Image (tube, rainbow, N blue to C red):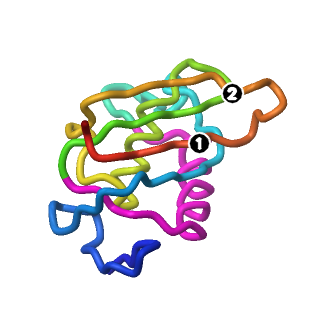
Amino acid sequence: MLRSAQGVECGAGGGGRCSLAATTTVSLPVPTSTNQLYIYRGKFRTISPKYRAWKRAAGEAMSRQFFDPIAGDVDIRIRVPDIDNYCKALLDCLVEHGVIASDRNVQFLEIEKLPMDDKSTVHIEVRPAQ
């Protein structure tokens, strides 16, 4: 069970069991570029060492934050230092850690470039779809 910032218990992974009307904000390290998520060996694809390291760091960051899982359709605003090739890893992380039930529920996605002085953190706001 996950406990939201308001103390409401929700099943891990969202799964439609809990929906709160508040905006959820998550901060994560800047992910690996989509171009570097996987390594191809012949016909097989495997997670790259860079992506594996980022997933571990993102998981640690998620475990230190309280968030409200949102079931159903969502709108997402992502603020990153570079607007290129980051969405897949970030959306997968939100699903894996139960912030949203599925990336198929994303109805609106806004990406904003952060000022150059903040190159280490990504800020993500998730709210029920309008």
Residue 112 part of the magenta-drawn span: no
**Nearer to us in this view, 98 or 19:** 19
Residue appearing at x 23%, y 62% in the figure: 19
Q: Amino acid at mark 1?
A: His
Quarter-wise, where is residue 41 in the image? top left
Residue 47 part of the magenta-drawn span: yes
Q: Are marks 1 and 2 in contact (CB under 8 Å)?
A: yes
Read off the residue under disc 2.
Answer: 114
Q: What residue range appears in magenta?
A: 46-71
Looking at the image, residue 109 sits to the left or right of residue 29; the answer is left
Read off the residue under disc 1.
Answer: 123
Looking at the image, residue 82 sits to the left or right of residue 102; the answer is right
Residue appearing at x 43%, y 28% in the figure: 40
Residue appearing at x 59%, y 42% in the figure: 123
The quadrant of the picture occupied by the N terminus is bottom left
Rendered location of residue 101, percent (x, y):
24, 53
In the figure, 86 relative to 124: above or below? above
CA gap, disc 1 to disc 2? 9 Å
In the figure, 79 relative to 24: above or below? above
